[in-house]
């Protein structure tokens, strides 16, 4: 995505919006960004045009731009979701805060580490899996 993304964005910035060159670059960039974000149906040509600056920064390695893009897609996915998830965690007001809190708690673990909870978490895990499935998100 890095080299192609830079090429597509460069083409889009130089070409006129209604030309085939611009449309082809936009279509290709949208396809790559959609793949990068797990096939999210929220990644459309219009979304890519609205977020081109952050996509460009993300391609250059800006993690904050990546987080802004992820946050926007999460908001879009959640706004369309019929699933309701109630998460109550001390110190967290919403799902995003909870995810950030978990990332902070486990950031020093080695890849492949196993975390065993001391309580029944099957309901919470099931709700998160349902959210990921409905939202088109992928996990690695």
Image: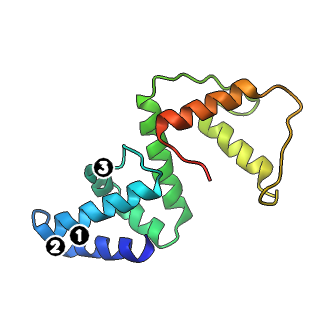
| Residue projecting furthest to the right | 118
**Going by the image, does 138 lie left or right of 10?**
right
Q: Secondary structure at mark 1?
A: helix
Q: Mark 1 highlights which residue?
A: 12
Mark 3 is surrounded, within 10 Å at the Cα level, by few (under 14), some (14 to 19) or many (20 or more) other residues, namely some
Q: Quadrant of residue 118?
A: top right
The residue under the point 18% across, 63% down is 23
Circles 2 and 1: CB atoms closer than 8 Å: yes
Q: Is residue 131 above or below residue 108?
A: above
| 2 and 3 marks in contact (CB < 8 Å) | no
Can residue 94 be seen? no
Of 23 and 102, nearer the camera is 23
The residue carrying mark 2 is 15
Q: Nearer the viewer, mark 3 or mark 1?
A: 3
SS at mark 2 in the image: loop
Residue identified by numbered label 3: 44
């Amino acid at each position: 995505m890095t080299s192609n993304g830079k090429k597509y964005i460069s083409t889009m910035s130089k070409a006129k919006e209604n030309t085939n060159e611009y449309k082809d670059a936009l279509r290709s960039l949208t396809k790559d960004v959609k793949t990068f974000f797990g096939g999210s149906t929220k990644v459309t040509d219009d979304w890519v045009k609205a977020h081109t600056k952050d996509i460009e920064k993300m391609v250059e390695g800006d993690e904050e731009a990546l987080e802004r893009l992820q946050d926007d897609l999460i908001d879009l996915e959640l706004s369309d979701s019929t699933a309701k998830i109630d998460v109550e965690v001390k110190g967290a007001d919403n799902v995003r805060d909870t995810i950030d809190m978990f990332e902070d708690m486990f950031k020093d673990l080695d890849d492949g580490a196993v975390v065993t909870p001391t309580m029944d978490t099957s309901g919470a895990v099931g709700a998160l899996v349902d959210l990921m499935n409905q939202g088109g998100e992928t996990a690695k």
